[in-house]
């Protein structure tokens, strides 16, 4: 590897209600594939992926991402704070565009992580945009619920891959830019 390349190790928490597609998004990002079967996450599943982001402030950057796919049960949120959130540098908060309550509840997840680790960068992902005929969440709903969070919102599909790579790499780049103070 080129000696001018700066390497960062980032821990990212993927949070949101059960069934919004967190595991499928991670699987799509890490392996490039989609699996139709639903597998409930118990606790947290750790996935890793290394990416080269091009340059940040004129210097080539390589990122080793450790992605924690957190179980979508808010009843365990306090436990997660101690066990999983510690050391996180960013948040990918996922809601299902076919289930409006999953957007409303997203704020509890983002607040839970930030209460534990501070004001780290976050991206909100409206997943399952491939299910156009079942969509319940409107852009206005997203703006209203997430207005105070000042986080980018991307609409994704783990099934088709739409915006998945952009979401993870975009968050990584935002984190690196916040860490580089030169």
Image (cartoon, rainbow, N blue to C red):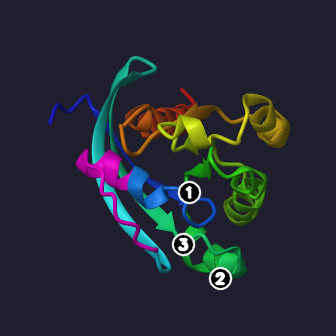
Image quarter in which the C terminus is found: top right
Residue 85: quadrant of the picture = bottom right
Residue 162: quadrant of the picture = top left
- Give the mark nearer the N terminus: 3 vs 1: 1
Q: Nearer the viewer, residue 24 or 97?
A: 97
Secondary structure mostly taken by the magenta-highlighted segment of the chain = loop
Residue 82: quadrant of the picture = bottom right
Give the label, 2 or 1, closer to the camera. Answer: 1
Q: For label 1, count other residues whose C-alpha is less than 10 Å away and answer few (under 14), some (14-19) or many (20+).
A: many
Q: Nearer the viewer, residue 89 or 96?
A: 96
Q: Residue at x 65, y 74 (%)?
A: 81
> What residue range appears in magenta?
26-40
Report which residue position mark 2 lands on.
Answer: 79
Q: Residue at x 82, y 35 (%)?
A: 147
Report which residue position mark 3 lands on.
Answer: 71
Report which residue position mark 1 lands on.
Answer: 20
Calculate the distance from the C-alpha at mark 2 to the C-alpha at mark 1. Answer: 21 Å
Give the label, 3 or 1, closer to the camera. Answer: 1
Image quarter in which the N terminus is found: top left
Residue 28 higher or lower than 13, as above or below? above
Q: Find out whether the residues at labels 2 and 1 contact each other: C-beta distance under 8 Å.
A: no
The furthest residue to the front: 133
Calculate the distance from the C-alpha at mark 3 to the C-alpha at mark 1. Answer: 11 Å
Residue 80 higher or lower than 10, as above or below? below
Q: Is residue 149 left or right of residue 49?
A: right
Residue 151, percent from left and from top? 69, 36
Residue 63 painted magenta: no
């Amino acid at each position: 590897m080129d000696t001018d390349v700066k390497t960062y190790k980032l821990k990212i928490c993927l949070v949101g209600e059960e069934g919004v597609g967190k595991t499928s998004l991670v699987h799509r990002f890490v392996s490039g594939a989609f699996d139709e079967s639903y597998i409930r996450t118990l606790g947290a599943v750790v996935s890793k992926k290394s990416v080269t982001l091009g340059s940040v402030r004129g210097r080539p950057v390589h990122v080793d991402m450790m992605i924690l796919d957190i179980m979508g049960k808010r009843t365990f949120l306090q436990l997660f704070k101690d066990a999983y959130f510690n050391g996180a540098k960013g948040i990918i908060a996922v809601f299902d565009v076919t289930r409006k309550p999953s957007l409303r509840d997203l704020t509890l997840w983002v607040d839970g992580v930030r209460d534990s680790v501070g004001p780290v960068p976050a991206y909100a992902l409206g997943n399952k945009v491939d299910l156009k005929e079942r969509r319940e969440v409107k852009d206005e709903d997203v703006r209203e619920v997430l207005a105070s969070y000042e986080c980018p919102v991307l609409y994704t599909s783990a099934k088709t891959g739409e915006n998945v790579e952009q979401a993870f790499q975009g968050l990584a780049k935002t984190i690196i830019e916040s860490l580089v103070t030169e």
